[in-house]
């Protein structure tokens, strides 16, 4: 179920959902209690307590609070000079990004450095990134987008990418169903989303699959359109951690000489691998979700899992549209997706199994 005030999704037992719907539709409480006593064959007092608990949950989940907006932040002026100015060429767009210092540059530029234009050119959009009073600010075409503290820097990075995908495809935020923290891998005109916790081998497997005939549609930031429910290409580079270099060097010799960066805020050493997706379409339908994990000690397995289990894994780590129509579309779309859990310790075995997933052999 979805609750609008906090854009909250919850997984509940069927009987709880039925009672919640009855509470929402303002069915008389006594009628709900009688239904429970008959349906579950439980004592009257137990039914009353259950309905009371559901009522409390409903009230808390549907209660709205006025949002505090600090209008003074919109008046913050950007600095007069920016230490770094970069131009990124993406399809027919030229996006100019001004970074106040190296700190802001590191948060964004590294994943888009492969798109950098070799010389200054006329920009179609201008992004400005700077700090003020221990917060990082983002302006797009001189419009204030938001500000974030150091501990929320990943939210800033997500918002930057969201603004970029909006100008790239000329779609407003309201026109996106959601953004998934996943790798979108394409083949034969359709794609699947590969998900996993940090360190599970998600980006490494994406790079391996790309080297074996698959297409990298997006890494880490996967936008899905609200109208068509299609996955859209996002041009960021693939983040390759230090311990994955030996595995990938035979396929990507350039990694040998690629610069390694120490992301201090994340305490990670990474190199960046440009995606090879120039020939792929900008969008394609999603054909399922794969929860992938590299485990050297576990036996190989690829099993289909329930949509409920997959849902509980996906929602906490995703941005989902807060618009009611989009929420309904998301629930309907997701319920039709096939979901798998893939655990592997041999790269060739993993690649072979993914080929089967795309050819519907499982």
Image (tube, rainbow, N blue to C red):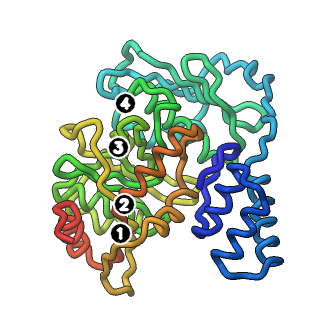
Considering the numbered disc 4 on the image, is that residue within a helix, a strand or a loop?
loop
Circle 4 packing at 10 Å, graded few (<14), some (14-19), many (20+), is some
| Camera-side mark, 1 or 4 | 1
Residue annotated with mark 4: 116
Say if mark 3 contacts mark 2, CB within 8 Å: no
Real-space Cα separation, disc 3 to disc 4, in angstroms: 24 Å
The image position of residue 160, as x and y in percent, is 53, 35
Q: Is residue 70 above or below residue 269?
A: above
Considering the numbered disc 2 on the image, is that residue within a helix, a strand or a loop?
strand
Residue annotated with mark 3: 231
Residue annotated with mark 2: 289
Task: Locate residue 32: give its quadrant.
Answer: bottom right
Residue annotated with mark 1: 340
Q: Earlier in the sequence, mark 1 or mark 2?
A: 2
Q: Earlier in the sequence, mark 1 or mark 4?
A: 4
**Left or right of residue 32: residue 286:** left
Task: Locate residue 280: give its quadrant.
Answer: top left
Real-space Cα separation, disc 1 to disc 4, in angstroms: 37 Å
Circle 3 packing at 10 Å, graded few (<14), some (14-19), many (20+), is many
Q: Is residue 52 above or below residue 174?
A: below
């Amino acid at each position: 179920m979805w609750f609008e005030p906090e854009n909250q999704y919850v997984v509940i037992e069927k009987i709880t959902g039925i009672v919640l719907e009855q509470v929402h539709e303002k069915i008389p409480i006594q009628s709900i209690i009688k239904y429970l006593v008959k349906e579950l064959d439980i004592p009257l007092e137990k039914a009353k307590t259950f309905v009371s608990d559901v009522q409390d949950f409903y009230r808390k989940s549907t209660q709205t609070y006025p949002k505090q907006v600090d209008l003074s932040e919109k008046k913050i002026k950007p600095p007069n000079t920016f230490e770094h100015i970069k131009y990124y060429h993406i399809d027919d767009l030229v996006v100019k990004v001004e970074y106040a210092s190296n700190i802001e540059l590191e948060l964004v530029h590294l994943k888009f450095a492969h798109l950098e234009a070799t010389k200054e050119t006329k920009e179609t959009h201008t992004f400005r990134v700077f700090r003020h009073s221990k917060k990082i600010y983002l302006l797009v075409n001189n419009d204030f987008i938001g500000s974030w503290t150091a501990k929320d820097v990943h939210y800033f990075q997500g918002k930057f990418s969201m603004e970029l995908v909006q100008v790239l495809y000329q779609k407003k935020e309201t026109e996106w169903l959601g953004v998934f923290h996943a790798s979108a891998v394409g083949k034969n005109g359709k794609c699947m989303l590969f998900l996993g916790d940090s360190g599970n081998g998600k980006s490494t497997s994406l790079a391996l699959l790309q080297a074996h005939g698959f297409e990298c549609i997006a890494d880490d930031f996967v936008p899905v359109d609200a109208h068509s429910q299609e996955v859209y290409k996002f041009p960021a580079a693939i983040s390759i951690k230090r311990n994955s270099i030996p595995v990938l060097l035979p396929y990507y010799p350039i990694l040998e000489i690629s610069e390694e960066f120490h992301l201090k805020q994340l305490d990670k050493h990474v190199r960046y691998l440009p995606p090879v997706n120039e020939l792929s379409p900008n969008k394609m339908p999603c054909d399922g979700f794969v929860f992938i994990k590299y485990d050297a000690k576990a036996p190989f397995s690829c099993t289909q899992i329930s949509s409920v289990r997959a849902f509980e894994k996906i929602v906490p780590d995703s941005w989902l549209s807060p618009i009611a129509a989009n929420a309904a579309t998301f629930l309907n779309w997701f319920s039709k997706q096939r979901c798998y859990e893939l655990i592997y310790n041999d790269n060739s075995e993993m690649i072979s199994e993914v080929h089967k997933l795309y050819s519907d052999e499982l």
